[in-house]
Amino acid sequence: MGIVVQKFGGTSVGNVERILNAARRVVEEKEKGNQVVVVVSAMGKSTDQLVELAKQISPIPDKREMDMLLSTGEQITISLLSMALKEMGHEAISFTGGQAGILTESVPGNARIKHISSGKIQGCLNEKKIVIVAGFQGIDENNEILTLGRGGSDTTAVALAAALNADRCDIFTDVTGVYTTDPRYIKGARQLKSVSYDEMLELANLGAGVLHPRAVEFAKNYGIALQVCSSMEKVEGTIIEEAVTMEQNLIVRGVAFEEDIIRVTLVGLKNEIQHLSTIFTKLAENHINVDIIIQSQTEAQKTSLSFSIKKEQLNETISVLENYKKELDFESAEYETGLAKVSIVGSGMVSNPGVAAQMFKALADEHIKIKMVSTSEIKVSTVIDEGQMLKAAGILHTAFGLDKLKAEAEVSS
Amino acid sequence: MGIVVQKFGGTSVGNVERILNAARRVVEEKEKGNQVVVVVSAMGKSTDQLVELAKQISPIPDKREMDMLLSTGEQITISLLSMALKEMGHEAISFTGGQAGILTESVPGNARIKHISSGKIQGCLNEKKIVIVAGFQGIDENNEILTLGRGGSDTTAVALAAALNADRCDIFTDVTGVYTTDPRYIKGARQLKSVSYDEMLELANLGAGVLHPRAVEFAKNYGIALQVCSSMEKVEGTIIEEAVTMEQNLIVRGVAFEEDIIRVTLVGLKNEIQHLSTIFTKLAENHINVDIIIQSQTEAQKTSLSFSIKKEQLNETISVLENYKKELDFESAEYETGLAKVSIVGSGMVSNPGVAAQMFKALADEHIKIKMVSTSEIKVSTVIDEGQMLKAAGILHTAFGLDKLKAEAEVSS
């Protein structure tokens, strides 16, 4: 007997029927003799509907009040799931993030979990109760409600698994596992039996929406074995763990893509040693996530600096740069919108030189212009025109032989 | 400068436009130089929608989980109202019941407020913030979320007014004040300028849905002046206070009515002295509100006992009576449904004998059969067939001259 954490995403609890379905999955696990903790997201599109409601009242709603608003979505799901389990004859109890002992930073809309006091949950598990916890939320020392940012329910699940020393953390979602690329858009996408934490981290960071990057990071740090699987179909999922069997010795294991990328270019920046750190410190202080960074020297004394951000952070980026324009001492800032990022990911790259070159050639052959490049040991990212994103992803998926992968489940575009 | 508590009901915050309208009312009060605390209900029919959702999952949903579910409704409104006020340039902060320091009993679905720690609210008021509190909810010592039962937002408002030693408590609703009877159903209903706490208490208890009885009780005990007024129209409301100017020396000031009444009759009850107390203690322990009670002796050793309950408590009443059948020692229980209660209320009754007789005659003249009667110093209630409820109310409204009352606002049926 061990502890299993199960997480059900928004689609998996999107209506009454699906909540009942999720409840049956919980009961199955419980009846295997395990203690079960369940983490749930808000039902279907309910978070989006709340955001829409807020925007009708305030174009840029106050972040603290947004957390107050959005945290209700998960609270609705936990109560309904608990009712469903009780209706099926099982002891269950629901907790908000705060009640579950999840303590977070005081960063509205994007708080990180600082600590979990798991005593209350453990006590309920010992009383043979199924414990249901609202994902995506916690409280700070002042009893303020905070959310973890989009996809934060995955993080809640993994953090609880770590705090409870759980045997497994199952992420139930609307896909059957992790794919070589997004099967909704790219023909020939194949499901992977397993991926390493690092690969998953890159894939998640690159917009493969199956798992939240923070959750993967957490799982890696605490050595929690994750399983991504379907809440609808009973098929094998994808395991995310440290040691991965190399499926057919694939060098590249995934192609990820993400739209709504903006390239910010600061022109006429004085070429001084502390400038770079000042700029990115200011951006980080304002919780702006900068991705790719490129610096190029244009004149002896002047330099230009480009970096990519996501579209939703454009307004804040502009205001930070305007506020510190004098201090940062640049001539002008340019913003290029309508861009996308396409990346290849694979642990095998480390020992196989020439992967990046092969990627650039495949894109060049199809006349796709690369605007920015970033590489790590296990990934290569390129920024291109948004209109060419899906074409580029498809080309790379084929170029690296991912469509030939023998898969558990095959999904056509 | 003083403290004013404003409460906006579900209809008054039913959509974005109405929330903005409520926000303007709050700002008006603030700009008079007052410190303002606002209590809000869930938006429009959202509580009913949540109940519906729960019932799809469980016919008799777990009460603790219902509190978890329903408390989200008010939480949504507080965040949206706070955003609206900030958008209008005012400092505002929203609190859930628990955050606001509202400590309740541990009775799911029907908890009473035990204590309010108003320090946090007072601190925010001192910082010139408008404080918005979720009505209808609180937490107990174990940090469990509890609701106060339907209409509980009124109670939250009055209790906060008492705890903060507020100068006034304004209840904004979808009607312009307290009427002699329900203007939606009875032609000639007139608005009252003022009513006493006791009259309002009887009217509220008798189903005049303008104010929750507990709220009136609280206001009476703490001497809080209440004002019921419209959130939509700027007309004078009705003041509820201790000393009331007798408008045209009315003996009866209101006719109230309520459907979904059930008469429970216990037949063949042993005529023993402790029986009555045992039965009603058991019912009270199970939080069943019994209204009218009639005992009649049928034989020397046996007696029969009738009492009225509300329809929503039928299932629980049946299960309590079944569970204690042996102990209570009755032969059978009968349940008559399809009944309604029609009552007349007025402080003037005390010094005017014959009011009840006048009521019975008016009903008898129209062939309305009275099934149960209950009287107090300031009211007479009758239980009749549901189908005759509105007719009876109309007859009594005319019989006691309420339609002749010169009123601020006249509303036709």
Image (cartoon, coloured by chain):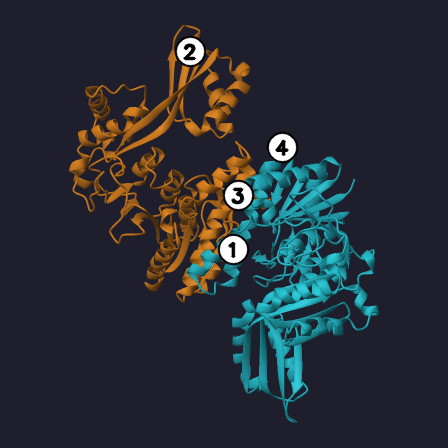
Chain colours: A orange, B cyan
Q: Quadrant of residue A366?
A: top left
Q: Which chain letter goes with mark 3?
A: A
Nearer-the-camera pick, B9 or B320: B9
| Amino acid at circle 1 | Asp
Residue A130 seen: no
Q: Which chain letter goes with mark 2?
A: A
Q: Where does label 1 land, which residue?
A: B48
Q: Where does label 4 land, which residue?
A: B88
Residue A273: x and y in percent read 46, 15
B339 is higher (above) or lower (below) than B98: below
Instruction: Say which of marks 2 and 1 sits in front.
Output: 1
Asked if the residue at tag 3 contacts the one at tag 1, i.e. Cβ–Cβ closer than 8 Å, the answer is no
Q: Element type at marker 1?
A: helix
Mark 1 vs mark 3: same chain? no
| Disc 3: CA contacts within 10 A as few (<14), some (14-19) or many (>=20) | many
Q: Quadrant of residue A367?
A: top left
- Who's the residue at 44% across and 6% down the image? A301
| Amino acid at circle 2 | Thr
| Disc 2: CA contacts within 10 A as few (<14), some (14-19) or many (>=20) | some
Instruction: Say which of marks 1 and 3 sits in front.
Output: 1
Q: Quadrant of the N terminus of chain B?
A: top right
| Amino acid at circle 3 | Leu
| Amino acid at circle 4 | Met
B410 is higher (above) or lower (below) than B285: above
Instruction: Say which of marks 3 and 4 sits in front.
Output: 4
Q: Where does label 3 land, which residue?
A: A69
B141 is higher (above) or lower (below) than B88: below
Q: Is residue A23 left or right of residue B50?
A: left
Q: Where does label 2 land, which residue?
A: A303
